[in-house]
Image (spheres, rainbow, N blue to C red):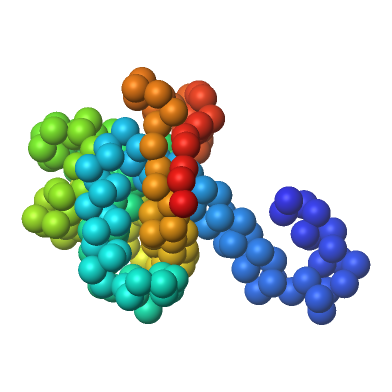
Amino acid sequence: MIDDLLLFQRADPEQYSDNTINGLITVNITGHMTHDVLDDGMGVNNPEVLCKAHSEIERNIQQGILLDESNLPKLQYLNCIINETLRLYPVVLLLIPHFSSEECTVGGYNVPSGTMLITNAWAIHRDPKVWVEPGRFMPERFECGEGDKGDGYKFIPFGLGRRSCPSSGLAMRMMGLALGTLIQCFEWKRIGEEQVDMWEGSGITLPKTKPLVVMCEL
């Protein structure tokens, strides 16, 4: 995709400026992220979560009115579902590499200046030393502050600091609108009694080994 955009830029630099290319790439990445979180965040293995989210939407949005961006600040439990989904199923396994700017010691290990540093977000998000029942899908943990970003930087789906993902705000709004609308407009269920397979395959973005297959009703 990037190669094609650069070719277009050489042919028409005014139409395909650096800002335009950056915007297209951002939207593409954000859309991919939103799709992954919708697959995981539907919560069909946890019907009580979907029921609670639907009740929250009914309490805060007038019947017959479709959810929009202005409603998102009122839907705190919906935001908790998205955060818990990003914790258990981060969009990427490893965050973007960085380099140490100077020699330092971390956890008893000497890190020379210029060392490549890679953060395993998946491992941090499932570490039993910092999370209660880390393998359990429990959005309520973000209601009680367990997932507070200031608490040891243990929730880092978008990275952290000045080098964190610049599109995190856009991604959260898109996921909130999409997931909230799907919960508001449809009733989601598993096709049978068997749990939906959430097993992750190999790759940078941890794709599911089996596609999501569920049933919905108006």
Find the residue positioned furthest to the right: 11
- Position of residue 63 measured from the top left corner of the image (x, y, whole percent): 35, 71
| 35 sits to left or right of 46 | right
Which residue is depicted at the point 55% across and 49% down?
Answer: 32
> Looking at the rendering, which quadrant does residue 195 occupy?
top left
Find the residue positioned furthest to the top: 194
Pick whichever, 42 or 88, lies toward us: 42
Which residue is depicted at the point 51% across and 48% down?
Answer: 35
- Position of residue 96 measured from the top left corner of the image (x, y, whole percent): 45, 47
Q: Is residue 90 above or below residue 151?
A: above
- Position of residue 23 measured from the top left corner of the image (x, y, whole percent): 62, 68
Which residue is depicted at the point 51% across and 25% down?
Answer: 210
| 14 sits to left or right of 150 | right
Is residue 183 visible from the viewing direction of this image? yes
| 178 sits to left or right of 153 | right
Q: Is residue 7 above or below residue 98?
A: below
Is residue 118 visible from the viewing direction of this image? no
- Position of residue 169 measured from the top left corner of the image (x, y, whole percent): 40, 67
Callout count = 0
> Looking at the rendering, which quadrant does residue 91 occupy?
top left
Pick whichever, 120 or 57, lies toward us: 57
Q: Is residue 209 above or below residue 79?
A: above
Pick whichever, 57 or 1, lies toward us: 57
